[in-house]
Image: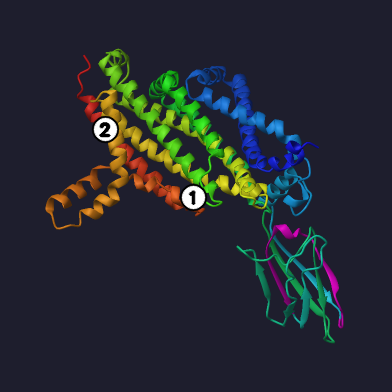
Amino acid sequence: MPPLFADASRWLIPLPPIWLLGVASLGVVLLAVACWWGLSLGAPRVAAEARASLRDGFLGPLAWLLLTFAAIAISFTPLLGLPLPPDFAVSDSSALAQFGRSLARMTSVNDFRQTAQVPPGAELQAIPLQFRPQELARIELESDQPLIVRTQQPVEGFALEKSPDVVLQPGQPWVWERTDGATNPFLGTTAKLEATSDVTEPANLAIRWELAAEHPQAAILPWAFAVLTCLLAGYAAFRLGCGRVAAIAAATTKEAIGQPLFAVVIVAGIVMVISFLVIPYNTFGEDVKMYKDSGLTLIKVLALLTVVWTAGVAVSEEIEGRTALTVLSKPLTRWQFVLGKFAGLVLVALLVFLILGSVLLAATNLKVVYDARESAKVPPVWWECADEMITVVPGLALAFLETVVMAAIALAASTRLGTVANLILCFAVYALGHLVPLIVQSSVGKFAIVRFTGRLFATILPVLDHFTVEAAVVGGVPVPWDYLGWAALYAALYSAVAILVALVLFQHRDLA
């Protein structure tokens, strides 16, 4: 076999996490088609509206993104059905089999009990257990007589340190729980115990165990499916429940996508995210962390640029060109116009994050394999690639919330300023917003003017540092769910205040 293809199977390792995203996308596409078919039978007008929404600027690009990932999932399914190379997995089962076992375990009962009787004087009596060692989360052994229990038996191909035998005393249970760094008491693909008794009475051995998914990373599939389904359902509810506001949002999104800047941002973002794969960061084997940091920063900056530019084009230029006056001559209020513009800006930012974020997630898996090859490390396994990919998601979510806050500020500024002035103001607010903690610290001085300035900035400007978690993403520190919730609440409150300011400024703006 030529050297180029001699180890081609190693490059299949980063595919399973991407395949999981593709299967989730395929499921959403099939669900959407089924819903549309049902509506076409029971509510033809709603079905026609759903079909027309594919051309409104947001749903069309999202549909193409989902179809692309669905095609990837269908294309690579045969490859993932092949057994993994022996040096990548504990067993020779395929990635598809591992997905199936893990997903089934997530939705099944995981608490089991078994009782075995050990006769007097027994030596290494085998007690088979009905579970796979890779799924063991907790096991407890308790006996009414003294026993010596062996958990590990020699397995060919394993050179791990042997676990010591368990010495059980009556009323003193032995417990093992899966924690970071804990050595599994069982080896191989089957589990069994060997009990030895030195007493003259039979011993009753009670065994209780709990199982967990062998690869919890397989939860990417249901989570991605749930998020995408909620996204489509929320957008459908927005279209049906807020007709006029949704019409303005759709027009804003369509206008933004038609601008050359949007195409430049998407193409440049994809090219740069992919090119970052081969850039040497000189971090002594930590290039993956720097890659995630660079990718998150790039996507955030490109999204901010797109949103601020769209706010200037969609609001200030419409006011100056008398287009807004024509729109408001229809049965449409000014607050509906402002809310529709803000919703359109949010949808534009969401499109940028969905497209470029998907590329970053997929490329992160490739970067793990590439970095291991370049650094002469042990070849990674697919769940290690998935772990690195999962850590990027909180960073993308918080960066999107930061972009929403800046969209509200850009909308308020665009009611009075032109496009160029709006760009300058927004990026000044962005820079100062990240410096608010330093400004607050500097306000502790003795000078009254310094204290007043620091408190003023801290009160008026958004604290954008709340949305910066690149350090946690780079360090592999998990971001708590409650932190994401509080950040979302802060973004919603500040955006609401900025929109109220925009309504006040636009309400008194002369459009004639």
SS for callout 2 = helix
Instruction: Point out the image quarter for the N terminus.
Output: top right
Q: Is residue 221 magenta?
A: no
First of labels 1, 2 by sequence position: 2
Instruction: Give the mark toward the camera: 1 or 2.
Output: 1
State whether residue 251 is above or below residue 268: above
Q: Amino acid at mark 1?
A: Val
Q: Which residues are magenta?
A: 120-143
* Colouring of the image: rainbow
Q: Which one is nearer the viewer's eye here, 145 or 415?
A: 415
Q: Is residue 202 above or below residue 391?
A: below
Q: Position of residue 200 (x, y in %)?
A: 85, 87
Tag count in the figure? Answer: 2
Residue 421 on image: x %, y %: 26, 27
Estimate the x, y position of residue 226 in percent, counting from the top left: 57, 39
**Callout 2, which amino acid?**
Leu
Dot label at residue 124: none
Which x, y percent locates residue 89?
73, 52
Q: Quadrant of the C terminus?
A: top left
Q: Is residue 55 visible?
A: yes
Q: CA distance from mark 1 to mark 2?
A: 30 Å
Q: Which mark is residue 425?
A: 2
Q: Assess whether mark 2 and mark 1 are in contact (beta carbons under 8 angstroms).
A: no
Q: Which residue is mark 1?
A: 474
Residue located at (36% from left, 42% from top)? 491
Q: Residue furthest left?
A: 448
**Is 137 contained in the magenta span?**
yes
Q: Nearer the viewer, residue 287 or 211?
A: 287
Residue 226 visible, this orientation: no
Q: Quadrant of residue 329?
A: top left
Q: Is residue 372 above or below residue 262?
A: below
